[in-house]
Amino acid sequence: MLQSLTGNSCVRLIQSNKSAWYFLFLVLGYILYLIFGAVVFSSVELPYEDLLRQQLRGIKRQFLQEHECLSEERLERFLSKALEASNYGVSILNNASASWNWDFTSSLFFASTVLSTTGYGHTAPLSDGGKAFCIIYSVIGIPFTLLFLTAVVQRIMVYSTWRPIMYIHTHWGLSKPLVAVVHATLLAFLAVSCFFLIPAAIFSALEKNWNFLESFYFCFISLSTIGLGDYVPGEAFNQRFRELYKLGITVYLLLGLIAMLVVLETFCELQQLKQLRKMFYLKKEKAQDRLTIMEHDHLAFSSMPDGTVNSPQEDKTEPFVDFPILTSPGGDDPMIK
């Protein structure tokens, strides 16, 4: 009997706090997913990092043996200075001295990566004034960009999602959730083709050292605003039409980001995903809802003109008015006041 009561109480506790349990499982699942990613990245990339370190040590050792007049300390200072400049996008190599990082088109490309929060990191402000302006520019520009993208996506959604779904649902008589799922799938396939597959083929043809996988990787990293910066187009030696190429990449990133937001918003409006999200959201208690309604009614009642308080329609409020605790010492009813 005791075990049965305990089991029933546990079941009632779980059922009454479903949202909290779902949220707990969500947090645990996210932590496990982070750990899973760390394990996979470490097991895959660590051997390559170790091999690269060994190769660099061997090259350095061989260079010092061939140039005995050069000490290791002087070489270390030179390499550290060169690497520090490379972090700012400045290279000492002869084949990289022809391109500038801060001409107009490169600066426009940098501004677009800052405002879209992609931030490749291959180019960074060198001066204190540039760093200060970057902070102010981002504080104003990023919310401005979010407002701009929200307005654009909302207008595109009318013609790309809402009207087509309603037209098919109305004229063909198909189920609206089914039409929404099929439409979202076709829209995602179209976006992947136009902003991932085709641009990846173009980048693999224009960039000499990129294959199709690396080009597709760049498109995904860019349009998902991850922006690792290990692949940046238009930085090759003697790049033809470099200014026009950089401008085209800037337009591609902006249009691609809008397309990704349209696809994500389309999927978020699916009824199945809405039900899934509600599982993890915090639900309002019924007592709180009643309290909110009572407070709303109280505000509405207190804002009534004096002439309408004693009307016949409001006779049901008289017990509330005559309740002694609400009566002031002077005899005036504070609620009516």
Image (cartoon, helix red, strand yellow):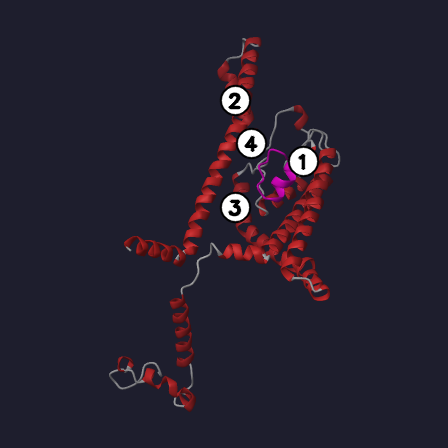
What SS does tag 3 mark? helix
Q: Which residues are magenta?
A: 213-233
| Percent coordinates x, y for residue 138 in the rendering | 55, 48
Determine which residue is flagged by label 3: 135
Question: Going 55% across and 19% down the picture, which residue do you hit?
Answer: 56
Does 206 appear above or below 145?
above
Q: Earlier in the sequence, mark 2 or mark 1?
A: 2
Does 205 appear above or below 326?
above
Q: Amino acid at mark 3?
A: Ile
What SS does tag 2 mark? helix
Determine which residue is flagged by label 1: 215
Determine which residue is flagged by label 4: 87
Q: Amino acid at mark 4?
A: Asn
Q: Nearer the viewer, residue 57 or 193?
A: 193
| Percent coordinates x, y for residue 142 in the rendering | 56, 50
Disc 3 to disc 1: CB gap under 8 Å: no
Quarter where residue 252 is shown:
top right
The extreme left residue here reads 329
* Residue 324 drawn in magenta: no
Determine which residue is flagged by label 2: 50
For the residues marked 2 and 4, what is the alpha-carbon distance in whole angstroms? 22 Å
Q: Amino acid at mark 1?
A: Ser
